[in-house]
Amino acid sequence: MARSRVRWFAWVLALLCGWFGLRVAPSHHFQTEAAQWLRDDARQRQLARSVNAGLPRVSADSFTTGAALFDGEWAFGTGVMAALGNAQLALQSPGTRAWTLTATDRALTQATSWEIRAFDRERWGSDPIDEPDPARAHVAYLGYVNLALSLRSALGRSEHDALGEHLTQRLVDAYAASPALLLETYPGEHYPVDNAMAIASVALRGRVDELRGDHPARAAQRRALAKRWTRAARLRYVDPRSGLLLQHAPPTVQDEPSTGLPRGSGSALAAFALNYVDDELSAELQRALRKQLLDPVLGFGVLQEHPSNVPWRDRRSDIDSGPLLFGYSISASGFMVGASRAHGDDGSFVNLMATFDLLGGLERREFPDGVRRSFVSGGPLADAIMLAMLTAPPHHDVGALLERASREAP
Amino acid sequence: MKRLIILAAVALASFVLDRLLAAWLFETNVVASLLAPSSSTALSSALLALTFLLNRVFLYVALPGIACFSLTHLAIGRLKTRPSGPPVPQENASP
């Protein structure tokens, strides 16, 4: 009897120790590492070195998604995210501007090149920059590139200023002609997340112009447009049950929810972009994402792509979500890193970064120009996206950072 | 003891595999291959990337749990088989 009790005790104790080894030790180690990203910007600089060194080799041929459109989108996305990441680093760390501004300009030159914008040109049948018809919005290209151009303009004059101003005015005119306040990503396709990028780019340029005292009436008009968009988006393009953004939504002029399914990846990317709009929609999306989709597994944070109110038959993966494993999305989790950083949700940030350190295979190497870090299982696109997310400025500091940049701008 | 040696050997092999694959992946781009395993090159890259991910989960998450369980079980087993109380001195039988 006594021996049998001892044997049971041994098993229970061994299982408890095993559970501790599985549940506590690994996540604690990776979370401690992840917290270093919040301490200062040393790791962000190392990641930026890696992104900037790899960017000149990136083209549509670098990717093999199986569809030329997506290969092109990913090559473009790598350049835009690299530009955003470097510019955000410059915004928050003036000491890095000597090289981050050069890197931003190089990334923008690449993202606006004829070859890189081919994916959008082929889909629309006309070039996104030289488009003669103002009704054709090209938001898949213009929304993203213009956010990077607007952020660059906040850091001082550059060769990209004229293009940024031209694209911003085109977007403003297109919204003025759209009662639903939803522009086309591709012909016949409307994605609120791409519109969130476009609106953020317009609002940001308005804020920068206002700080500089350039065209005050025009700047006020652009900021008002962004306010109008966020108000309309809350009523029309945000799912009232989950609080998440609809991924694909037909435009509507009624102030009631459009049809479409809420998704994690689109909502998290929109929360990141809308950080530049002087409005709380970005914070509301981040809170909804944390409540509805963030799901720590053994202490590692991962985001579901679909909230519980989406029927199982509709929970499919696509190019935006990336491959789903038990419903968890790497894309949504990556974009949530930026949204969590922007809104000071350090707990979610650390949990998510522990996952990216583990599964992304974060590696550190010495190079002649300094230490570089890279998420080795993600390739250049993942590195560029993570750089943009890991340098997202705190929402309530954006105004002060823009003001300082405007004061210090050459 | 044999179990511990096997565990240590598995941990070492897993760690070496992790370092080798990390060094290889640092130089390549595999995320696209994971999404489009249509060509043979993409398939081999995707398999290597998947091996890297699964090995890291095993090495850094599962293995510490297995090691804690095994070590505790072994330690308790040792305690159980150890004779209790101080050793009794043998009487000298010789005159």
Image: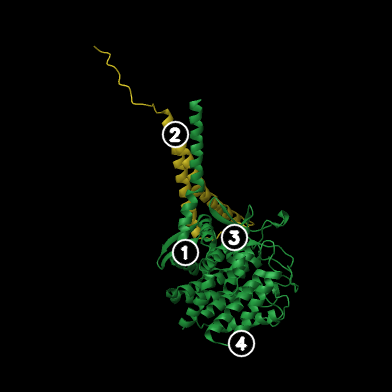
- Callout 4 amino acid: Ala
Please tell me whether residue B85 is drawn above or below residue A238 in the rendered image: above
- Callout 1 amino acid: Leu
Residue indicated by mark 3: A290
Please tell me whether residue B93 is drawn above or below residue B67 in the rendered image: above
Color scheme of the displayed model: by chain
Can you give x and y, in whole percent of width and height, for residue B17 in the image? 48, 49
Label 2 Cα crowd, 10 Å radius (few <14 / some 14-19 / many 20+): some
**SS assignment at label 3:** helix
Residue indicated by mark 1: A38
Q: Quadrant of residue A288?
A: bottom right
Q: Nearer the viewer, mark 3 or mark 2?
A: 3
Q: Are marks 4 and 3 on the same chain?
A: yes
Residue indicated by mark 4: A217
Q: Are marks 3 and 1 on the same chain?
A: yes
Q: Is residue A41 left or right of residue A384?
A: left
Q: Is residue A125 left or right of residue A212?
A: right
**SS assignment at label 2:** helix
Q: Nearer the viewer, mark 3 or mark 1?
A: 3
Residue at (47, 60) in percent of width and height: A35
Q: Which chain: green?
A: A
- Callout 2 amino acid: Ile
